[in-house]
Amino acid sequence: MICPLLGAIMNVCVRIVRNGQKCLSGISKRTLYVSSAHLRPLGVPFVIEQTGRGERTYDIYSRLLKERIVCLMAPVDDFVSGLLVAQLLFLQSESKKKPVHMYINTPGGSVTAGLAVYDTMQLVQCPIATWCVGQASSMGSLLLCAGAPGMRNALPNSRIMLHQPLGGAQGQASDIVIQANEIKKMKDKLNQLYVHHTGQSLDIIEKALDRDNFMDPYEAKNFGLIDQVLDHKIGTPMPSGAEKTDD
């Protein structure tokens, strides 16, 4: 009885894999944000637009990219970092003057992956407006405050969290010392970046990052992490991300 049952299970698995391959082969590879169905979150809506050549379908993230809007809505890892870097470089090639709007809702993640995004934000010439929706924790808080001066924003019910980098080491004593020194160097580097973007002294930054430090948007504004809190009650206009600026 076991062998026939195992064979039936294997046949089902083969059919699932083949069907998945057929679905992937039919997806356009020209989308910058995502290029394969298994990389796209389930339930992502599509937008259908009428053009002179008929209908054109975009997933919602690709449509937002046309408006120079990028989204960091996941933990920061190498894959997410690669997507953001690619999008920023693409938008830089489209226009060096039109702003890019980056919406952030992330618990943080890899320091090295986050610094890749940070360095790209500083590299491109187009101004980058950052928007905290939900949370900008850990590395997300650095990316939030790394936006262009005067263009760092948060929604009223979002939260920002700072802390020192986390890490661990195992192996021989010499290897552990090497890893500990590297974590210390990374901590010092991050402290200097926060000093640069907030205007706070190094002593204040070191104390603020010593343990998990949660802030509401108004506290983050007073600390220098953001420039303004967007409150819909007072009719603050939300940007479309499609400002008309000459190249």
Image (cartoon, rainbow, N blue to C red):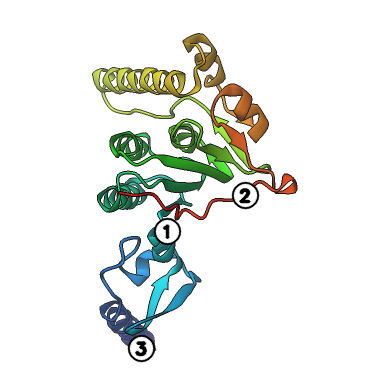
Q: Which of 101 and 195 is in front in this view?
A: 101
Q: What residue type is labelled 1?
A: Glu
Q: Gap between marks 1 and 3, in whole Å? A: 49 Å
Q: Position of residue 116 (x, y in %)?
A: 30, 38
Mark 2 falls on what kind of element? Answer: loop
Q: What residue type is labelled 2?
A: Pro
Picture residue at 28% right of the left edge, 81% below the top: 26
Q: Position of residue 118 (x, y in %)?
A: 36, 36
In this rendering, the answer to whether 226 lies above or below 180 is below
- 10 Å neighbourhood of mark 1: few (<14), some, or many (≥20)? some
Say the numbered circle drawn on residue 237: 2
Q: Which of marks 3 and 2 is nearer the N terminus?
A: 3
Q: Gap between marks 2 and 1, in whole Å? A: 17 Å
Q: Nearer the viewer, residue 91 or 136?
A: 91
Q: Position of residue 239 (x, y in %)?
A: 54, 51
Picture residue at 47% right of the left edge, 11% below the top: 202
Mark 1 falls on what kind of element? Answer: loop
Q: Which amino acid does label 3 sit on?
A: Ala
Picture residue at 63% right of the left edge, 44% below the top: 155
Picture residue at 26% right of the left edge, 69% below the top: 30
Q: Which residue is most to the right?
A: 233
Say the numbered circle drawn on residue 169: none
| Mark whose residue sits in front, 1 or 3 | 1
In this rendering, the answer to whether 158 lies above or below 240 is above
**Which residue position is annotated with label 3?**
8
**Which residue position is annotated with label 1?**
67
Q: Which of marks 1 and 3 is nearer the N terminus?
A: 3
**Quadrant position of the N terminus in the picture:** bottom left
- 10 Å neighbourhood of mark 2: few (<14), some, or many (≥20)? few
